Image (tube, rainbow, N blue to C red):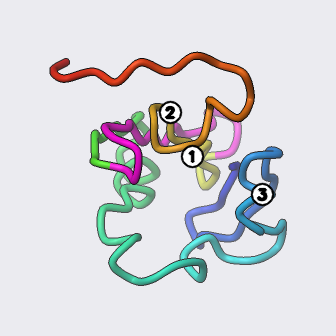
């Protein structure tokens, strides 16, 4: 997703759309407050640096990123990668990792 520091969604990819994340809404309004407890959007904007975290998703370890957009300091590219999403349904082989 491309979001603003205000958490407004500017653009969302197909995977985000599957979760019903809509342009113009606030990403923080989806899910429970606990799901947003680890949000690092402000940190990425305030420091103008990428922030990355690891977490346990529903299908194993995953990685979350908040990447500032240089031309628009209030904008953040936010995405997660890893087995937290159903990549198998897309035909992508997924291997569980015991340790990184």
Horizontal relation, residue 5 to residue 58: left or right = right
- Asked whether residue 97 is drawn in magenta, I would say no
Residue 10's quadrant in the figure?
bottom right
- Answer yes or no: do the residues labelled 1 and 3 have beta carbons within 8 Å? no
Q: Is residue 21 above or below residue 2?
A: below
* Magenta-drawn segment: 57-72
Q: Are marks 2 and 3 in contact (CB under 8 Å)?
A: no
Front residue (pair 93, 49): 93
Residue 89, x across and y down, in percent: 70, 35
Q: Nearer the viewer, mark 1 or mark 3?
A: 3
Under circle 3, the secondary element is helix
| Front-lying residue, 53 or 43 | 53
Graded by Cα atoms within 10 Å as few (under 14), some (14 to 19) or many (20 or more), the crowding at tag 1 reads many
State yes or no: residue 67 in magenta: yes
Q: Hey, which residue is sitting farthest left in the picture?
A: 99
Tell which tag, 1 or 2, sits nearer the viewer: 2
Which numbered circle lies on residue 18? Answer: 3
Label 1 sits on a secondary structure element that is strand
> What residue is rendered at 50% in x and 21% in y?
94
Badge 1 vs badge 2, beta-carbon distance below 8 Å? no
Q: Residue at x 27, y 21 (%)?
A: 97
Q: Earlier in the sequence, mark 2 or mark 3?
A: 3
Return the x and y of residue 9 as percentages of the image width and height.
73, 64
Image quarter of the C terminus: top left
Residue tagged 2: 81
Residue under numbered circle 1: 78
Marks 1/3: CA–CA distance: 16 Å
Residue drawn 38% across the image and 36% down it: 63
Question: Mark 1 or mark 3, which has the lower sequence index?
Answer: 3
């Amino acid at each position: 997703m491309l979001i603003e520091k205000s958490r407004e969604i500017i653009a969302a990819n197909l995977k985000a759309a599957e979760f019903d994340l809509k342009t113009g809404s606030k990403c923080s309004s989806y899910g429970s407050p606990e799901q947003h407890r680890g949000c690092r959007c402000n940190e990425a904007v305030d420091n103008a640096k990428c922030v990355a975290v690891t977490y346990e998703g529903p299908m194993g370890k995953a990685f979350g990123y908040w990447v500032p957009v240089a031309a628009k300091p209030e904008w953040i590219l936010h995405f997660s990668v890893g087995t937290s999403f159903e990549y198998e349904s897309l035909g992508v082989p997924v291997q569980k990792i015991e340790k990184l």
